[in-house]
Image (cartoon, rainbow, N blue to C red):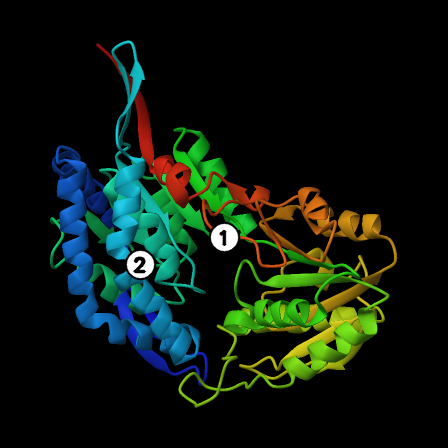
Amino acid sequence: MSVLISYDPIDNKAIGKVSTTSEQQIAILVKKAKSAQKNWATQSLIERQQQIVAAYKHLGTVQESLGLLISQEMGKDFRRASYEAGGAVQNAQYFCQEIAASLQSESLGHGSELQYRALGIVAVISPWNYPLAMANNLLLPALMAGNSVILKPSEETPLVADLFVKTLNEVLPDGLLQIAHGGADTGKALVNSDINMVAFTGSLAAGKHIMSSAASSLKRLVMELGGNDPMIVMASADIDKAVQFAVASSFENAGQMCTSTERIYVDERIADEFEQKVVALASRYQVGAWDKPGVNIGPIVNAKQHRKIVAHLKDAELKGARFLLGHADYQLPFIQPTVVANITADMLLEQDETFGPVVAISRFNDISQAIERANDSPYGLSASVFGGVGAAGIAEQMEAGMVGVNQGGGGAGPWVGAKQSGFGFHGGAAGHRQFAQVRVLSK
């Protein structure tokens, strides 16, 4: 039996291992999931809710251990990792109540009723950057809707997922929630197995493969496929507020966040002041190991992602960008806080998702030009506009699933991407219903 070893990104030392799941073993998991799902779906919403809430209450016994593993496996500073673990545990009761309310049957009149019933088996394929939160956001509505779940976590963070599932399974019915460990081959085998739905968060390339594989059996899909999120700063913006958001959003989780601000278009009339204040704030960020006091930018998760960020920075340097803070080349495992100006449309920093602690700035003298460049991307996850009068009108023209005016996108409601950033969505009443089969019963 092969094993998957998890490494600390700080020093590349092994911190644990799990057994990988073969294609033959996936068939066994699916068979077990089918049996468990039939019994689970016969229970009422309130009965399912009570069992899930009890399982998450039990999860609280390992909350600190989950936070520690998040830090050790992907490098997130312990304060943020603890928030992630605590959020999954402490918000479960409210989250289940919200899901239950969205899945209640509705009268259509004339003896007809709209029902939300189980689909069957849901494969949840989750990423490494928020290894607990992202998995949790997908598997909870799946379970509440009466489905069974097979979780395939990222191979970068298997230990977090393993403890998460094992602890919940000390309360949940046997076979209802299972885990499949491994890399891309494991994910492909799971997608091709006899399941009913795939809920995926990850890269655009992987999402296209999943969609192609799912087509032959018309599996349901909910996929969030990353972003290249723009920010427009108008001359009328509160500059200090815009600077605070730009830096915080670009640097959160070392920039390894799908809604990180990736490219900023600022009116040339305020650009000098904006850039100076961005540099001043960015210079205060501390880089280092997750357990060091004051650190708020940890290591990049692995060498592959580190190389991608450096390649983007070198490309920008070659094409004439100005480095206001930092430079174009860093050694593993860190990327220092970096601020780059004079970004142009032909640079990788503008064309692709960098996923690192980089503030990338370009100036404009015509707001229509800024809107055009902001929308010139296959991605459309989140966007933001900072400004006074007219900012809301600019936001209406942004091609993104979540747009914020003087704040980030992604407030209340579903987590949804436009264009190639998403297929289906999750969160909010409409998103929870994506995990259910809609049925109209007429009597």
Q: Residue at x 56, y 82 (%)?
A: 332
Q: Position of residue 327 (x, y in %)?
A: 72, 82
Who is closer to the viewer here, 330 or 291?
291
Q: CA distance from mark 2 to mark 1?
A: 32 Å
Neighbours of disc 1 within 10 Å: few (<14), some (14-19), many (20+): few
- Please state if 168 lies on the left or on the right of 361 as rendered: left
Mark on residue 411? 1
**What quarter of the picture does the N terminus occupy?**
bottom left
Who is closer to the viewer here, 49 or 228?
49
Local SS, label 2: loop
Q: Is residue 227 above or below residue 213?
A: below
Q: Position of residue 208 (x, y in %)?
A: 53, 42
Going from N to C along the chain, the mark reached first, 2 or 1, is 2
The residue at which mark 2 appears reads as 181
Question: Which quadrant would residue 268 be assigned to in this image?
Answer: bottom right
**What quarter of the picture does the C terminus occupy?**
top left
Q: Residue at x 32, y 79 (%)?
A: 15
Q: Is residue 441 in view from this perspective?
A: yes
Q: Amino acid at mark 1?
A: Gly
Who is closer to the viewer here, 233 or 64?
233
Q: Amino acid at mark 2?
A: His
Q: Position of residue 77 (x, y in %)?
A: 43, 79
